Image (tube, rainbow, N blue to C red):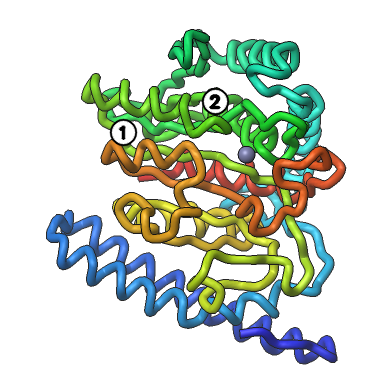
Amino acid sequence: MSLGFSKASDFDSVASEYRWMNQLRIKVGQIITNLWVRRRHRCPAGAIAVVLLMFLLGYSWLDLQSPAQCGREEGIHLQPLDSLAVTQVNVQSTQEKREVELKEQLRTHLGEIVRERDPYLNTGGHFYVQQYIRQQLGQWGNVDTHEFTVRGKVHQNLVLNLPAARSNKRPLLLIGAHYDAVPGSPGADDNATGVAVLLELARSLFQEPANYPVRLVAFDMEEYGLLGSTEYAAALRQQQQPLRLMISLEMLGYRDQRVGSQRYPAGLKRFYPNCGNFMALIGNWQTLPDLFRLSDRLRKVGVPSEWLPAGQRGTLIPATRLSDHAPFWDQGYRAMMVTDTAFLRNPHYHQQSDRIDTLDLDFLTAVCRGLAVGIRHLA
Ligand SMILES: [Zn+2]
């Protein structure tokens, strides 16, 4: 649904209606998710019924979100931290300080990573970025190298393991981002933003560990057909390595507040906002409870968030398979992509113009913080 607003009061009344409905939608979703998880639903028919119910509950109200968010030029609004025994003013100022620091760290990473770095045509840039990632991740532990060969040339995925808060016997939470870029593009959004967030998640999850052991992987050769992640997912499956969840960070920093700035694959348009100001979470159906939880966390830090269960392997909507999560789907793992929707929103996709100055660093910073909190609290 697309609505125009002539007066601020029109906007506010729909915005408050949207907030009320959205809260109700999230609550109902959480109750269903909890019931589903508690009963350990394994019946395919039951799972399909739950997914259909989610669609009905979720999407029938979603299009109110578009006018409530679009057309309003505003930054990310910070929410207070969880209740602490300090004044809200102190909490707010500490949080704002952290936010500024995080933004500067992300900006620094982007400054190092954004450059031409095709593994064949820009070997200097590619090597530089690889070494930068190795050095940054190396602050938090040993960086392992997963090597694979393509047409006689050896390529590297870089891997860092971080311990869990308590038991390391739990299955791994794997977070990945690809560090290569297409020839002729400095790849700021694609995918320096994903790598920058990966590096800051490493810092955050080292300082305050998650409930699961975390493995961070910087993948190579994504742009040549998801080659690094395909090799890695196959190796994990061969080792019978269980995974709690795989998250692919794929283009996280482009936002467009204008009405009509968001495009969709065929059939999805009527269910989602037409304003390109949100993060999209796209997972196979086993990730449904996690899609809810992470989406909810992002919303709580002021990032509008939409989710899409893409079936078992995303074959119905091919655009959902265009990143490093897809090989994990194919190996039967729970996996999701977090994305600003790439070419469906960003006109600089795979262009020479995919530069830092086209990114929205406030948006990127909030996404990074929301993901850190969400990942840390995954049950
Ligand atoms: Zn790309």
With 38 as the anchor, is 113 left or right in this view?
right
Q: Is mark 2 within 8 Å of ligand 1?
A: no
Residue matched to label 2: 221
* Residue at screen point 42% across, 71% down: 27
Relative depth, front residue between 255 and 347: 347
* Residue at screen point 58% across, 66% down: 264
The quadrant of the rendered image in which ligand 1 is seen is top right
Q: CA distance from mark 1 to mark 2?
A: 22 Å
Q: Secondary structure at mark 2?
A: loop
Three-letter code for the amino acid on which mark 1 is drawn: Leu
Q: Find residue 45 and report its horizontal and vertical position in percent.
A: 15, 67
The mark found on residue 243 in the picture is 1
Marks 1 & 2, CB-CB < 8 Å contact: no
In the rendered view of the protein, which quadrant contains the C terminus?
Answer: top left
> What is the tally of numbered marks visible in this picture?
2
Instruction: Please determine whether, in this image, residue 53 is positioned above or below residue 250.
Output: below
Task: Identify the residue at the far left of this view.
Answer: 43
Among the two numbered marks 1 and 2 on one chain, the one whose residue lies closer to the N terminus = 2
Instruction: Please determine whether, in this image, residue 268 is positioned above or below residue 39.
Output: below
Report crowding for label 2: few under 14, some 14 to 19, many 20 or more residues within 10 A (C-alpha).
Answer: many
Instruction: Please determine whether, in this image, residue 234 is positioned above or below residue 50.
Output: above
Q: Find residue 205 and report its horizontal and vertical position in percent.
A: 53, 29
With 22 as the anchor, is 90 left or right in this view?
right
Relative depth, front residue between 294 and 262: 262
Report crowding for label 1: few under 14, some 14 to 19, many 20 or more residues within 10 A (C-alpha).
Answer: many
In the rendered view of the protein, which quadrant contains the N terminus?
Answer: bottom right
User: Quadrant of the rendered structure where residue 30 is?
Assistant: bottom left
Three-letter code for the amino acid on which mark 2 is drawn: Met
User: Quadrant of the rendered structure where residue 330 is?
Assistant: top left
